[in-house]
Amino acid sequence: MAGFHLRSILLCFMLAFAAHAHTHIRNIIIDGKALDREECIRPYESNFNFPVKGVNNRQLVCRTTSMSPSKTNTCDVKAGSTMVIEFHEEMERSSRAIEGKHYGPCLAYLSKMNSDGSPEGWFKIFEQGYDSSKKRWCIDDLNDNDGQLEITIPGDLQDGNYLLRGEIIALHLAEKRGGAEFYNNCVQLRITGGTGSASPELFQIPGIYKEDDPGIHFNLYDGYSSYNIPGPKLYVPGSTPANVSNKTTNPNEPVESSPVKNDPEDKDPEDKDPEDKGPEDNDPVTSPDTEGKSNKPVKSNCTRNRKRRLMRKRRNFNVRRTKKEL
């Protein structure tokens, strides 16, 4: 009986510790002004600071079941400006960002917002992982900075409504597949003043992470000197998507063709007729990649040579038969 009570006490202690080890985006700061808790942030669930588990979990989008834009105020932000998102364990702003041993990266994504409040497609605008020279994680800096994470809004965005998704990935249980903990929330923004030239590659969430990604399935306790931040590459304002060529593909563009090889049968000495050295044989085969002006099918030299060879053999045969008759 005593053993049962001891296990119960230990379980309660572990649950209490776990609850205090969680985190959420409590508030944001725009133009130096700290807004109220949950202002312009998608509505919290009852377990507001609990993690999302699993890379295919739908809660990985904004950690909420309410994606209606009408349930969240929209905050105005200028493109090119810097704003702050604040992570805290509890509802009180005085609480720390996250338990100090929950090492992992900090990330931020942006997406245009559809009329129904859903994201159009995400691109990464911030990432900070592990600094091997200082042996510090983003979590270390976050706790030192009272949970504040500075995010620069790209200056080349089109004006419109956006979702800013801030995220911490805690790796203290990530040595087991599926053990990573995701702490993410979405801020609803109206961004104006950008150049409008941005063309980032867009990604869907869930979909940016895999359970076996080295930055998701990671052992903090096995010794490490580096860390690969998961997800797509960081978007750099003014850049083009990495997997999209700047060259526009033209379906009518000529395709390189291999040179036509001569038929081995064309080496017959009797085929060396002086009359066969016309321009038709010496000129290269006309094809779209040399002329570029005609889409007519190209006839091979081999076909023409065979026809001429047959004609020459017939002519030579007739000449021989005539000589014999004489």
Image (cartoon, grey):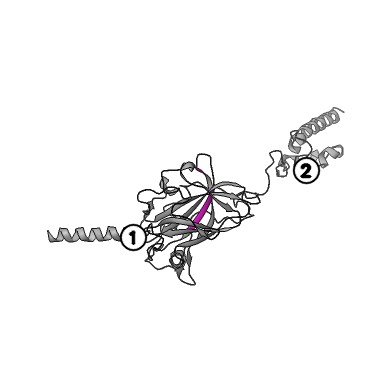
Residue at image position (44%, 62%) is 147
Which residue is at the far left?
A: 1
Q: Nearer the viewer, residue 146 or 322?
A: 146
Q: Looking at the picture, does residue 148 appear above or below residue 286?
A: below
Q: Alpha-carbon distance for marks 1 and 2?
A: 72 Å
Q: Is residue 209 visible?
A: no
Tell me which amino acid carries mark 2: Thr
* Discs 1/2, front: 1
Which residue is at the far top?
A: 325
Q: Nearer the viewer, residue 131 or 314?
A: 131
Q: Looking at the picture, does residue 304 appear above or below residue 3?
A: above
Segment tinted magenta in the rendering: 107-119
Please give the residue where the numbered disc 2 appears in the rendered image.
Answer: 290
Categorize mark 2 by other alpha carbons within 10 Å: few (<14), some (14-19), many (20+). some
Q: Secondary structure at mark 1?
A: helix
Residue 140 image position (x, y, % from top left): 44, 67
Residue 120 image position (x, y, % from top left): 53, 43
Please give the residue where the numbered disc 1 appears in the rendered image.
Answer: 20
Q: Earlier in the sequence, mark 1 or mark 2?
A: 1
